[in-house]
Image: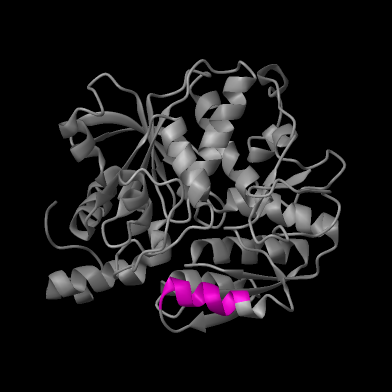
Amino acid sequence: MLVCASCKTAFPVDRPRWRCECGSYLVLSASGMFSPGDLAGRPASLWRYREALGIEDSTPAVTLGEGFTPLADATLDGFPLKLKLDFLCPTGSYKDRGSAVMITRFKSWGVSEILEDSSGNAGASIAAYAALAGIRANIYIPQSASAGKAAQISMYGARLVKVPGTRADTARAAWNAASDIFYASHNWSPYFLAGMKTAAYEIAEQSAWNTPDWVVVPVGGGGLLAGLYLGFSDLLKAGIIRSMPRLAAVQSANCDPVYRAWLQGLSDVPGAEPKPTAAEGIAVAQPVRGKAILEAIRGSNGVVRTVADDLIWDSVEALGRQGVYVEPTAAVAPSALAAMRKEGLIAAADRVVVILTGSGLKATDKVVEHYAAQEPAMAGSGAPMHRV
């Protein structure tokens, strides 16, 4: 069943619906659960956890083999940790987890055309899976979005609409257009959120069901954070793991509504006025699932931290020196580690997983622009000329 997060009205899952009549978002209830003993021999994709996704066995999956990304050993600033390389999903971002599950449900519903608004990654991902499913897609993105993401969306055959102004302006434009086309918003869909749970399942399975002490993620709309909490909660309830990792939500200091709400002890996230930031993918002024985000942080005994743009760019470089090229939004999470260690939040013996969400190839225009402004020699070189 689909259940309203606010008024608790229940809806059947056999008819297209993206929100409750009261205006609140929906959650997927009473999905099943897999057994670790059943996983052997299943495909190395998120569909190995199908029982927990709310998609019937008889429903063909719309899939590009997404999920089950590497959990790699790394060292940042002398601290050993694990990097969850989710930018290696098929379209270059973790959003494929949600898109695959959501578009699979839409195809089973017979939806023929959808509309989505995005800072870029979700739009590109949904455009790809819609193309695979034979569903027409209309994707709204900010005019300032990275050129790589815009090109991806167009190449998948979607109708691309660039909206002048902020990310919030893009959401409003899409909302107005959604009166005539089914709104396939990754921020609203309960099936997109179900796909996000698989990141928790994978981290646990790849750790031999011995969960880390911390999982650190960038947060804007909060789908990944909320999905992680739901996924780890599923595993705890099933007795598959023994403890819930602490979740660290990291935001840009230039757009930090979740941080402010958490600091003030609020139960929901009020809107905030964002400033320009390198982390375009998490520049969300007011997340739809504000309550769920705060519940995930508090329910996991987690924290929220903010980082400035200069630290974000430092992390882009530091990761690059280890052979990992991510966009600035993805570098937000590791940017907070040094301060968390200095505060004593992360102990020397703690096991930490940092999720890297988007490929640097998507934002190469932004990377080149940044370093060209920093060092004119960069403009024609194709590589940073300075040392980290």
Asked which quadrant contains residue 363, the reply is: bottom left
Measured as percent of width and height from the top left, residue 261 is found at 36, 50
User: Which residue sits at x=25%, y=38%?
Assistant: 337
Q: Which residue is at 12% across, 59% downward?
A: 386
**In the displayed structure image, the side of residue 239 where residue 253 appears, left or right:** left
Extreme residue in the bottom direction: 164
Asked whether 376 falls inside the magenta stretch, the response is no
Q: Nearer the viewer, residue 253 or 81?
A: 253
**Residue plotted at (21% across, 76% down):** 380
What kind of secondary structure does the magenta stretch mostly adopt?
A: helix
Residue range in magenta is 166-175
Q: Quadrant of residue 344?
A: top left
Is 83 drawn above or below residue 104 in the view shown?
above
Horizontal and vertical percent for residue 185? 62, 63
* Whether residue 42 is situated above or below residue 191 in the rendered picture: above
On the question of residue 42 being in view, the answer is yes
Locate residue 178 relative to residue 228 in the image: left or right.
right
Q: How is this picture coloured?
A: one colour
Vertical comparison of 114 with 327: above or below: below
Residue 308 locus on image (x, y percent): 21, 56
Q: Nearer the viewer, residue 249 or 53?
A: 249
Q: Position of residue 69 (x, y in %)?
A: 52, 39
Viewport quadrant of the N terminus: top right
